[in-house]
Amino acid sequence: MLRAIALSLALLVGIGTIIPLATDTTEAGPRKAKKKKQKRYWRGVRKYSKRWWQLYRAQERRKKAVAARKRALRLRQIRLAAARSNQDDTVAKTSPAVREPKKLVAPAGETAPTALKPVNASPAELQFRVDNASGYQVGSASISVVGPAVSAESGPRSVGGVSTTALRREVIDRMIRENGWVVNDYQRQIAGQPVYVVVAQSQAKNGSIQSRMFYFTEVEGKIYSVATNSPVNESERLAEESEKVINSLKSRVRPALRASTER
């Protein structure tokens, strides 16, 4: 009987020891280790410490300064836009009554035809554009001094003593440079004096044919050239405007070619 009791106690003690060990072994699988919550640090300074509060306040001051500069810049842009808008409105209101369009003054001192719009002026050449009634450009023209005249007389084969062959050669050389060719040449009377005319053509970049007219005339010891460039269908209009300019040259009272703009 005692042996049975002793054996039972031994079994109970052994079972009580084995069960906890088995349970720990079973639950000992791979598990992620819980990370300890790290305390936050800001720029190497412990949070909420005295140094941390100093750096935090400095950072907030910088943010406020940047925001203030942005607001000031935005306000300045708004004011500039408003001032520019007011200026444009003022110019638009006053331009019809106060500001007059610039007028091209022809060599004789008279106002040139309204179709002429100055483009570029230099001591040697005056360039301008020719507009139609709708304000669209239909061609361009230029007035330049070819050189001094040899004599004041112009005959069938000369202008101011310079042979028309030399003037024609000058046009041919120019057309060669500008991918063009000479079509015809003749002399006619404009403002009671002979004018040598060379008719030429050139090809524009878009492939269309351009009409080129060159007028040579002598005025006060100098030979002037009036050259035009326009589409073929606008050549007659350019010829009319060129004759007006030549009339101004013939009736001029000033000793030198001078173009200017006046208000």
Image: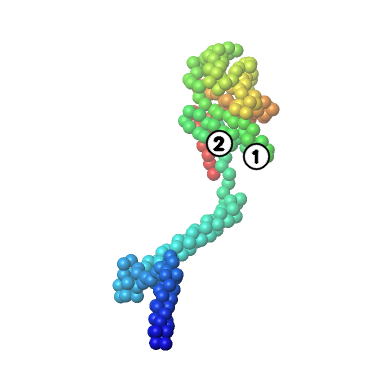
Is residue 173 visible in the rendered image? The answer is yes
Q: Nearer the viewer, mark 2 or mark 1?
A: 1
Q: Quadrant of the N terminus?
A: bottom left
Q: What distance separates the C-alpha of mark 2 from that of mark 1? A: 14 Å
Of the pair 135 and 147, the residue shown nearer to us: 135
Q: Which mark is residue 2?
A: none
In the figure, residue 245 lies in which quadrant? Answer: top right
Q: Residues within 10 Å of mark 2 (few under 14, many from 20)?
A: many
Answer with left or right where residue 199 lies relative to residue 170: right
Location of residue 110 in the rendering, given as x and y in whole percent from the top left corner: 57, 35
Disc 2 is placed on an element classified as: strand
Location of residue 15 in the rendering, given as x and y in whole percent from the top left corner: 42, 78
**Pointer 2: what residue?**
118
Q: Are marks 2 and 1 in contact (CB under 8 Å)?
A: no
- Where 174 sits versus 114, above or below? above
Q: Quadrant of the C terminus?
A: top right
Is residue 250 visible in the rendered image? The answer is no
Amino acid under label 1?
A: Gly
Answer with left or right where residue 137 lies relative to residue 79: right
Q: Farthest bottom residue?
A: 1
Location of residue 170 in the rendering, given as x and y in whole percent from the top left corner: 53, 17
Residue at x 40% of width, y 82% of height: 7
**Pointer 1: what residue?**
135
Amino acid under label 2?
A: Pro
Sequence-first disc among 2 and 1:
2
Residue at x 46% of width, y 64% of height: 71
In the figure, residue 62 lies in which quadrant? Answer: bottom left
Location of residue 96 in the rendering, given as x and y in whole percent from the top left corner: 61, 50
The colour scheme of the drawn protein is rainbow
Residue at x 59% of width, y 22% of height: 214
Q: Residues within 10 Å of mark 1 (few under 14, many from 20)?
A: few
